[in-house]
Image (cartoon, helix red, strand yellow):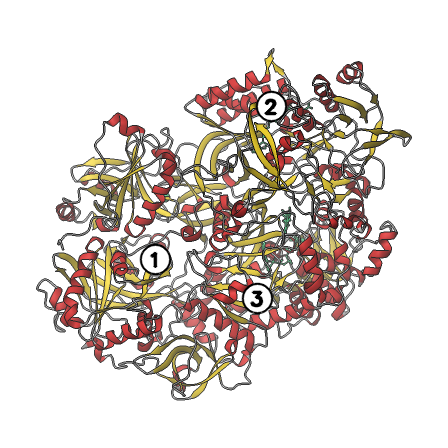
Amino acid sequence: MHYIKCPWCGLRPESEFQYQGDATKKRPDDDAPIEAFTDYVYFRDNPKGRHTEFWHHTGGCRQYLVVERNTKTHEIASVRYAKPHEAKPHEAEPPKEGETS
Amino acid sequence: MSAQGSYRLGAGGAIDRAASVAFKFDGKALTGCKGDTLASALLANNVRLIGRSFKYHRPRGVMALGSMEPNGLVEVREGARREPNIPATTVELFDGLVAQSQNRFPSLRYDLMAVNQLASPFLSAGFYYKTFMWPASFWESVYEKAIRKAAGLGRAAGDPDPDGYDHVHMHTDVLVVGAGPTGLSAADAALSAGARVLVVDENAHVGGALAYEREDIDGAPASAFVDAATQRIDSHDNGDVLTRTTALGVYDHNLVVALERVSDHELTPGAGKPRQRLRLIRAKQIVLAAGALERPLTFANNDKPGVMLSSAVRGYVNRYAVAPGRRIAIVTTNDDGYRTARDLIDQNVEVSLIADARDHASAVSSEIEGRGVPVLRNTLPQKVLGGVETEGLALQTKDGAPVADHRCDTVAVAGGFNPCVHLTSHLGAAPYWREDLLAFVPDIDDKSLQTAGACRGVYDTRACLDDGAAAGVEAARRVGCDVVSRSKSSTVALDAANVFEGPGDGKKSFVDFQNDVTAADVRLSAQEGYEAVEHLKRYTTLGMATDQGKTSNINGLAVLAAARNVPIDVVGTTRFRPPYTPAAIGAYAGHHRGKEFQPIRRTAFHRCHEEESAVFVEAGQWLRPRFYPQGNEDVFAALKREAAAVRTSVGVCDVSTLGKIEIFGPDAAALLNKVYINAWSKLAVGKARYGVMLRDDGYMFDDGTTSRLAEDHFFLTCTTANAARVLAHLEHTSQVLYPDYDVNFVSATEQWCGLALAGPKSRALLADIVDGFDVSNENLPFMGIAETTIGGAPARIFRISFSGELAYEINVPWGWADHLWRKLRAAGEAYDLTPYGSEALAVLRIEKGHIAGPEIDGRTMASDAGLGGMMSKKKDFIGKRMALHRAETSGERPSLVGVKPVNTSERLRGGAHLVASREDGLKDSLGWVSSVTDSPNVGSWIGLGFLKGGMEQNGRTIYASYPLKDEFVEVELCNPCFVDPEGERLRG
Amino acid sequence: MADTPSHSPLSHIKMAPAPQKPASEAAKELSLVDYGRVGFLYVMARSGQAEALADALGFPTAPNSTKQTSDGVAMTTAPGEWALIAGAADVDSVFASLRERLAGLGYVSDQSHSRVKFRIAGGNARALLVKGVPIDLHPREFGAGHCAQTGYGDIGVLLHQVDDAPTFDLFCYSGFGETLWNRLQHDGLEYDVACHGA
Amino acid sequence: MKYSAWSIFKEGLNRQRNWPRAWRDAKPKQSYDAIVIGGGGHGLATAYYLAKNHQLTNIAVLERGWIGGGNVGRNTTIIRSNYMFPENEYFYEHSMKLWETLEQELNFNVMVSQRGVLNLYHSDAQRDVFSRRGNAMRLAGVDAEILDADGVRQKAPMLDFENARFPIEGGLFQPRGGTVRHDAVAWGYARAASALGVDIIQNCEVTGIKIDGGAVVGVETTLGSIRADKVAMAVAGHTSEVARMAGLDLPIESHVLQAFVSEGIKPLLDTVVTFGAGHFYISQSDKGGMVFGGDLDGYNSYAQRGNFPMMHHVMAGGMAIMPTLGRLRLLRHWGGVMDMTMDGAPIISKTEIDGLYLNGGWCYGGFKATPASGWCFAHTIANDSPHELNAAFKVDRFKIGQVIDERGVGPNPWIQ
Ligand SMILES: Cc1cc2nc3c(=O)[nH]c(=O)nc-3n(C[C@H](O)[C@H](O)[C@H](O)COP(=O)(O)OP(=O)(O)OC[C@H]3O[C@@H](n4cnc5c(N)ncnc54)[C@H](O)[C@@H]3O)c2cc1C
Ligand SMILES: NC(=O)c1ccc[n+]([C@@H]2O[C@H](COP(=O)([O-])OP(=O)(O)OC[C@H]3O[C@@H](n4cnc5c(N)ncnc54)[C@H](O)[C@@H]3O)[C@@H](O)[C@H]2O)c1
Ligand SMILES: Cc1cc2nc3c(=O)[nH]c(=O)nc-3n(C[C@H](O)[C@H](O)[C@H](O)COP(=O)(O)O)c2cc1C
Ligand SMILES: [Zn+2]
């Protein structure tokens, strides 16, 4: 089970989150060519390895988080808010050896 | 001779002889004692034949101790609690236990299906892939039926499981799996270093292998160490030892799922207790101290009742004071056979012979030989002799010289050890072969998982203690405790012969006992090219039984390696998967079953509806009134009466389940502009507007009415089904797409409960209940809103209509629901106020041509639903470009139409296809009918649907084809709005 | 027919209020109490105003923390968002006053009716809670004054540890109130949970 | 050697000495007319039909591990042709027809068991949606029946008709649907293809696709480089990774889907049951194990294992609809990597590179497609143009607004 260290709520199980897919795609401006929209909507890098993706903490603080996760090992390299917040994040202790997130 | 079994020894054991336990096996009443397993009690009673094998129906008995048992499977308990395929070695004996043998007909001793053995030359691995192909239709009707009936061992209970299960979330610094010497030592060390520690062990007892041995630690019996360590850990605030708890699987990020068998050692669970409890353990560090399992040897008839593992024979004698036989021969490749011999002799059980595959003596072998046991070196077992049970043993020297047959009733087999690497492999790591240990050992160098003790090939108890302590200290250090690392024990080469199989063709030499896979099957598999180890497994089913190859895998690999003529490490292992031992599906489901499958959500008016005898229906997790039967009305009568009341007087309907979201902030209107296809900036305070949302790909997502309560405060409503998704969508838009927007949301679905008051008399009724508010058309026009009070209750009143009638939606805070309902019912008497449910609501909205779930099914574009005109050209909104693009490229799309049968007595059905003629096939289908109702207002069935060409075809007749019921109805295409198309009623 | 809102989704179940007991005794047993509706105000800061708002209202800023203020207990629930628990009787006046004080800083929404409060207390309170709550409740990690927006089983709850008895308050959506209550009652059976009205 | 009752009898007496290898153990040649990447069901079927229907025999299947080790070897074995959109329905029905004669075609018993597939519905609205699908099937000449609750009870009496959270109202039943012995499909196609001259090369991973002047010229592999005029990809969950070697950008995400099997028991369930409202489906294998599954775990993944939340959900779904499962024990569970397209429909297509063909995007339903997929892909490769059955499954449909989104959830494969 993935445990994601929400910058607000702390370490929480996957079941509290709703996955929201690839976070590298940016919604094009209204006047961009249609190819930009089809690319945004349908096409995915889908890497085997590090993937930057959204997890929505629906069962907690309801923040969209940007998570860097390895799609092969499921290891999580980093977690941050999608929308930057000025408020203090969760006491960020240095991750101890063996802690995955 | 003991009353608790004729094979019970006079002394010793960890059983409570004073406490007799009565149980039944195959209908026969027997007695064991407290502390027995079903297996030990059966052996004590000289019941050695306890089941029949899978394919050949060969007689089988107990072979092992604990959860590794491949052979001794029985059905336990009765009725709805019956469980198939349970190893008798894992069943703790309790008073009233009922067990039965399985897979036999008519009886265990005389099983007719044993004729399969005669056919065995033709039932070799994979035989079914090569036959049963002719004639084609015979597979399901004849062959498969027979195969299915023959397959499977036990029977499932026919009835729902009556017992409960629950789940518990646990967190710990260090989880230790296995409470043997290694595990206890690891836990002890980690705990003293300051870590939070949890130990789990699958057995009812602690001590692991030591519980079956007569061994000393530091000059005292091992049990003294075990008890003291357990006591130390368990009594510590930060320590816990859980027995009867199996670590089933290791999942990502150090989640270990463990199963505690809370009540399985009792007849029924105690009050308030679950039968089993799943423990979801999130451990920062895991120490696997799971021990090693002894493996058998492969030789003919090695599956007969009476053939047992050497360590098991010893364990039955030591722990249960049961002699597995009267005259026991031992075949061994290492010193373990001699340890067994020693404990047997000490208990005065005859050891008739030891056949050792090694050519040399060892300290313990000399000791045993010195005590008068005949030892044959360089000797391999060839065949077990006997009928149903073991009567003797045929042997050969390693170079093939014959040895005289030996008479015995039991054969103890010691083939070496397989470290319990299973859990290390759940996340994908493969073990590697150690020639010095003749074993696969874990190759895991994980920052959060360590193995220790016998589980990594350290077999000496003293070394296990040290190894455990080192692992415990290391785990504590990794979670931040201030400790000094200790060094791990080194493994010592096993003095063992490199032998896995005895001489012979292997046709009756079983590798996988439970699945009846022989050495010959393995060789055939290799011969036919199924030589990758995973092919071997799938072609022969090796290792696929309930024991998942705990006894069979390595021996199978050895035969395969020999057949392929490669070293065993080239062959490799198959992958272990969770669970470590089979675990009840009910336990995984936990509390979630039956009605509790998903939580039930009730509206504020739930009790009011109950008082009105509503029939409820599920709407997602919500319960909503479906209709309110009067007398013995059925659903059709009730919905017609309810719908008619709305059209003629006034009805009331609970609409609380609609999603409601308060939106605050200066950018609230800008946000709505992004998510809705229509424009919001100019909506006046105090007004409501209908809006449609699209997905990114341009299809319709949701619709609803949103009101402006203040310049920077909106109140959005959305469909019941999409409520959660819409909130997430708004959050996505504001946090991800447009993080600069200054907006806030709060879900208000349960703050406000809502009733729709609909019908020509709704205004009059409303006027009667509001606290002096002017509800005239001028003051509260269509799409107007009012914030007022009703009998003191704060109320928001929205002049909106789903039914097409003059209608209002009244929202009051949840706690005022009863109050509002009663007030309406009292005042409503004068107007014949009728509560209506979701069925009547559907009638009304279909009559009005309002789209709902069946129309907005994720494949509909706004333009398909006749809402294309709402799309603002002036602004950007989500889905805009894709919708416009698709409209250009995807040709003629079906769009919304109304349909009614030409012959008004005919019935329409949702899901019918619209076709031009009876001959038309799927490719010619022009559209479909999405919603239908028997309209009281129109006087016939009517429907909404989607049709290529849409409303341009108004007036044309085509056919609604429903071949599932052989129905073919001529229908006229018409305006989807069947009632008041000009909208005079709702605006009046 | 009283002109006051009903107190709880469980109003139809008649439950006696908890008997008064010496604290030492109460601490030993496990109790589950339905408080029904309490004052529950949801406060949200405008962009960039979270700290100013917290300063102005004396709200806590650290995640998962709570603070007693003159308006009630404020709990942080999300960046720039708080739940403020006030007495049910005061909620209207607190709401009105907050609206004024929040001008330019943020918004407040009265959510008192959307939630119900259940209280779990006594020696086995944690043993009961871990049957549904996935987070670590060990006193090293979660103590008196902590709060967390999480779930009990599938039902979202705002969890607040009130004291070291330990006493925990759970706030859940009203629609799930009855379901959560039944579930807690069921899960507490093995600890002889005593269930009461407030 | 031809497989038959006679050969079994003969070899039984002959101590099984003469059974030959099921497929030749081939080593790669320097060059082939066509190379199929991926020794799964689709790759092997493609090779077989290339040889059988199009007489292309100088071809090889390159498999990075052992054949059948991918999704064909780990799926829940359900076959059906119960689709609603014509693009899907005709294609899957073609597959069903091929299944019905596959044993004779391959001389290998793949145990096609047409025991019926039953989709439960729980409301009138759901019945209408299922009816639309059932009627589509019937209009396409395919078997389908709509059952009420009593009809369902007859097929599966052990379902919960009393206490279910979502009471059973009825079901859509396809009698010809059923199950197939999954591993045997890979082996059967491999054996038949090998007999026609196809090289089946295991432990040979493709690491690069060589392109010259906009046309494919061969592949790089762990066993060296191999020339080929045509290269066809059929690598399922690894489609994005392999296509990337040719610079192709795809509308695909890889997700993990779990499957579960219980201990073997005597016959309990005679049909395939899907409980969509609970995201659960189940059948019983010929060996006696209850084989069941649910939804995707719901995050991008290339790991062949799942996690606990979905596992829990699946078990709960099982208990909600079949409470007699409670005391049955889970024996094993595993995962597979699914190539999820953004509209849920597959791709069998030419690509923008000459001589490079793409078969993928099978989502969680590609096993039942195996024969038709191989058949159509072979046609597309041999003729450099699609068959009418797969014409709609072109890769560029996403760029031109012609998605085939039968599920209607949009480009979010993780939404259930
Ligand atoms: C749990 C589960 C349940 C399912 N249930 C069903 C079901 O009931 N019904 C149904 O119809 N479908 C089902 N499916 C889907 C179905 O299994 C797949 O869609 C289908 O098997 C995919 O086609 P394939 O057999 O060719 O794939 P695979 O068997 O995965 O074949 C692809 C092969 O390509 C190989 N490969 C990858 N990269 C390379 C490389 N670089 N070089 C060489 N070789 C490579 C892989 O090793 C693999 O062997 C299920 C899938 C799963 C995982
Ligand atoms: N003489 C030999 O050559 C030899 C070989 C092997 C072991 N041994 C002896 O065995 C002992 C080994 O000690 P140890 O502590 O390493 O192992 P152990 O076998 O004593 O203890 C391991 C324990 O873990 C339990 N277990 C295994 N998997 C589990 C799971 N998934 N969940 C819960 N419990 C699980 C087992 O049932 C067992 O109780 C020593 O006393 C050693 O001398 C000796
Ligand atoms: C239909 C089907 C039935 C299965 N039955 C069994 C079984 O009876 N015993 C078993 O151990 N595994 C069974 N498996 C699972 C396989 O052992 C294996 O886990 C699966 O094919 C995935 O491979 P992997 O675990 O090696 O990755 C079955 C798999 C499928 C697809
Ligand atoms: Zn959070």
**Circle 2 sits on which residue?**
B211
**With respect to residue B420, does D59 lie above or below?**
below
Chain assignment, label 1? B
Q: Chain of mark 3?
A: D
* Amino acid type at image mark 3: Val
Q: CA distance from mark 1 to mark 3?
A: 41 Å
Q: Which numbered disc covers residue D395?
A: 3
Please rate how many residues cluster around mark 3, counting C-alpha atoms within 10 Å: few if below 14, some from 14 to 19, many from 20: many
Mark 1 is on which residue type? Trp
Read off the residue under disc 1: B622
Which chain's residue wears label 2? B
Q: Give the secondary structure at mark 1.
A: strand
Asked if the residue at label 2 sits under 8 Å from ligand 2, the reply is yes
Element carrying mark 3? helix
User: Residue pushed farthest left?
Assistant: B772
Q: Are marks 3 and 2 in contact (CB under 8 Å)?
A: no
Q: Quadrant of residue B763?
A: bottom left
Q: Judge the density around disc 1: few (<14), some (14-19), many (≥20) Cα neighbours within 10 Å.
A: many
